[in-house]
Image (cartoon, rainbow, N blue to C red):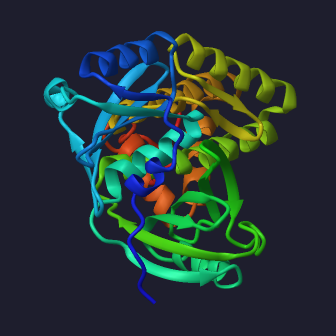
Amino acid sequence: MLIHNLTMKDLFSSLPVIHQHVSAGYVNALIQMRRQELFTGVMVTKYPAGEMLASLFWEGDHLGLFQCFEETNLSIPSQNWPLELERADADASLLTLTVEGLRVLQMFLELAVGGGEQSLLSSVELPDRLKKWSLLKEGGLVRISSSQFASIISIAGFADPNLECVDIVDGSAHFSRRNVNNQDAFGSGEYQVVRYTCSNEQDVWRENGLRLAFNPLVQALIARFQELAGRILAERLCDQLSRWCAGGGWKISIGSNGVTDHQFFASLTQAVRAYHGIIRRFQEESSLAIGPRLAENLLREVLEKMETHPRELLVEHLFGRHGLSDSAVVTGKEVTEP
């Protein structure tokens, strides 16, 4: 059954208005206020003719400006921002987000363009449909809406059961991670659903995939290192890596359970630089404890045991372009001591 296509414009229209009928100068003042207060989230401005603009912020940094239409979202080049914001009689709304929620919303604004696959699903049908989509060899974004709430869901695909969700309830956003195997993840009711397929060639989606692949890689590396060197040295290594990340200005910490990543990267290049640096640092520090040969073989062993899709992303971005291409991880050859 086809229903009206649900868009970000529909969602943002439901947010409480905090400033009414303000001038373009006042809108620019509001943007400056968001910068000063290190705001993370979305500021929405709506205009009498129906236009809607969404400004994306991370810790006060104005990341992007999008025009929301009924059937698509349009990213506006930064050089055109002053012209686009020169509109009178705006109503302004705010949606505060965590960095995790911001990632999901950024992907939706950039990637959910054009008409999506639409359906009307019951609470029994929805979990099965989400599970089906998670098994595809492609990722996607899903927008669901019921009488109680709306939710934007990022589905990694390639049999990854984890969902990253932003629920919008009463004008507030709540981020959560859910599992497709949980039949009660979204409660009871009837849902209007729109699914958008995401191309693996789009940088923002590749960055998302790289982030999701990086955590299990690091978790497995630390676990294997602990088997070889012991718990105390493993804890010390995690502490060294975390302090190194902090010194680089990244909100990333390393522990025995993997990566706690609260860093927002404005580009795939920035993410690659950070993750590559962490792996290089791991190699350097672990080599001091177990020797360079074991450290190289450890990295190769862990990578080879990963699922195909995340391994391919890691090899492409971390081990093929930025200085690790000569390692045993890529060549498949055992490293020998000189």
Residue 13: give x, y in percent of width and height: 44, 49
Position of 269 relative to 161 (above/below): above
Residue occupying image coordinates x 60% and y 54%: 164
Q: Nearer the viewer, residue 286 or 196?
A: 196
Position of 217 relative to 142 (above/below): above
Position of 208 relative to 310 (above/below): above
- Left or right of residue 211: residue 92: left
- Left or right of residue 146: residue 95: left
Residue 108: give x, y in percent of width and height: 41, 53
Position of 235 relative to 247 (above/below): below
Residue 156: give x, y in percent of width and height: 51, 61
Residue occupying image coordinates x 45% and y 47%: 12
Q: Is residue 210 visible?
A: no
Q: Nearer the viewer, residue 270 or 184?
A: 184
Q: Is residue 257 visible?
A: yes
- Left or right of residue 168: residue 228: right
Q: Nearer the viewer, residue 78 or 222?
A: 78
Residue occupying image coordinates x 37% and y 68%: 197
Residue occupying image coordinates x 61% and y 36%: 295
Residue 266: give x, y in percent of width and height: 37, 31
- Left or right of residue 26: residue 94: right
